[in-house]
């Protein structure tokens, strides 16, 4: 389908939300009443609460005067760029102001919010990264002392977990796939990380970490804890070569390149939304551009997939 005019875009939203015209069951977003009627002006009217509404209610398009065509083009561009797209570039592509493009980007990033509806399981890698705080670019008089290593004086800590998995490709063969969850944290210590691990990782899973002391008691939480000692220059341990955190570190490298190459700098206030965006891109990297857009579109109108349905969509 080509979204080349407003009516086509509206029809796509209506059909996806409430079904085709012959079987359409429009549900009032205010009171939940079914079988709302269509007015002559194209709006819907609920005979129960007597309120009028459009197909854009309860979607990211609701409070925007921008045309749906521009929204749909923006969503496609955002979903198809491997490392994201800046507000300046998006503004040039769809011919809006930079401020409007920035607003649209943050609206779309809100769709990526992560949740714990389905726990990570099997083999899970855990690692942390520090964003910002490059003191070497500052004048000597402006540098903050003692910011090396894991200091959070000028850096923001981010914690991530990655499930090792497999999917069936188009040829019917199994290939490696990984799914990541990541979030901004206040500290990298036991009191902070253990509740997150317990929330997002299924009991009995095998958890791979480095030698950081914050992970010392992960084995006491019901997990099979395996450690790779990076300080001793061990990056792949054990005879079978299964103990490593290279996959999650690869995600951090990709995330850093996204920030440096596309956005250049992000504030602590919005860092989590950029992390959510990076996780979405990583978890959908095996999808075609059209399927990734479809997933984003269904989420934008409130039809959020479960993680199981999401994984099936990736594998398809």
Image (spheres, helix red, strand yellow):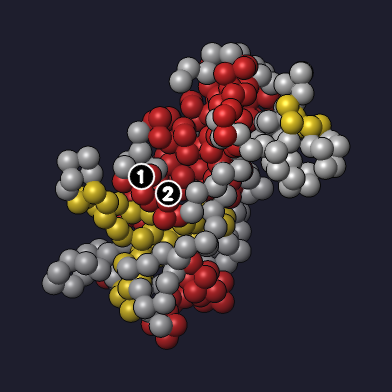
Residue found 27% across the figure and 64% down from its top = 244
Residue found 74% across the figure and 41% down from its top = 28
| Rendered position, 17 above or below 154 | above
Residue that carries the numbered disc 2 in the rendered image: 310
In the rendering, at what x and y percent does residue 46 appear?
A: 79, 37
* Residue, far front: 22
Residue that carries the numbered disc 1 in the rendered image: 314
In the rendering, at what x and y percent does residue 201 appear?
A: 44, 69
- Label 1: which secondary element: helix
In the picture, measured across the screen, residue 239 lies left or right of residue 107, that is: left
Q: Are marks 1 and 2 in contact (CB under 8 Å)?
A: yes
In the picture, measured across the screen, residue 189 lies left or right of residue 162, that is: right
| Rendered position, 125 above or below 72 | below
Whole-angstrom CA distance, mark 1 to mark 2, is 6 Å
Toward the viewer: 187 or 64? 64
Toward the viewer: 286 or 46? 46
* Residue, far left: 239
In the rendering, at what x and y percent does residue 59 appear?
A: 66, 37
- Label 2: which secondary element: helix
Toward the viewer: 283 or 244? 283
Image quarter (top left, top right, bottom left or bottom right) of the C terminus: top left
Residue 61 visible in image: yes
Toward the viewer: 95 or 23? 23
């Amino acid at each position: 389908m080509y979204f080349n005019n407003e009516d086509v875009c509206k029809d796509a939203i209506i059909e996806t939300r409430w079904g085709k015209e012959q079987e359409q069951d429009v549900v009032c977003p205010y009171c939940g009443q079914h079988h709302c009627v269509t007015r002559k002006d194209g709006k819907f009217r609920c005979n129960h609460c007597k309120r009028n509404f459009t197909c854009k209610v309860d979607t990211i398009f609701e409070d925007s005067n921008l045309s749906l065509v521009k929204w749909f083009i923006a969503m496609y561009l955002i979903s198809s760029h491997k490392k994201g797209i800046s507000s300046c570039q998006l503004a040039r592509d769809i011919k809006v102001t930079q401020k409007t493009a920035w607003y649209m980007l943050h609206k779309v990033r809100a769709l990526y919010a992560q949740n714990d509806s389905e726990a990570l399981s099997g083999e899970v890698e855990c690692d942390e990264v520090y964003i910002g705080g490059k003191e070497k670019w500052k004048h000597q008089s402006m540098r903050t002392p003692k910011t090396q290593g894991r200091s959070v004086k000028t850096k923001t800590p981010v914690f991530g977990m990655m499930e090792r998995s497999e999917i069936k490709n188009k040829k019917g063969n199994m290939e490696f796939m990984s799914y990541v969850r990541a979030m901004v944290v206040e500290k990298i210590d036991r009191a902070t990380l253990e509740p997150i691990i317990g929330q997002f990782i299924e009991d009995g899973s095998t958890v791979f970490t480095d030698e950081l002391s914050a992970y010392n008691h992960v084995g006491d939480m019901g997990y099979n804890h395996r450690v790779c000692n990076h300080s001793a220059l061990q990056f792949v341990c054990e005879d079978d070569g299964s103990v490593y955190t290279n996959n999650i570190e690869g995600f951090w490298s990709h995330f850093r390149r996204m920030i440096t190459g596309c956005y250049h700098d992000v504030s602590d206030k919005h860092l989590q939304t950029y992390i959510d965006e990076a996780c979405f891109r990583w978890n959908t990297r095996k999808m075609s551009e059209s399927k990734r857009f479809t997933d984003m579109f269904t989420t934008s109108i409130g039809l959020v997939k479960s993680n199981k349905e999401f994984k099936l969509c990736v594998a398809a």
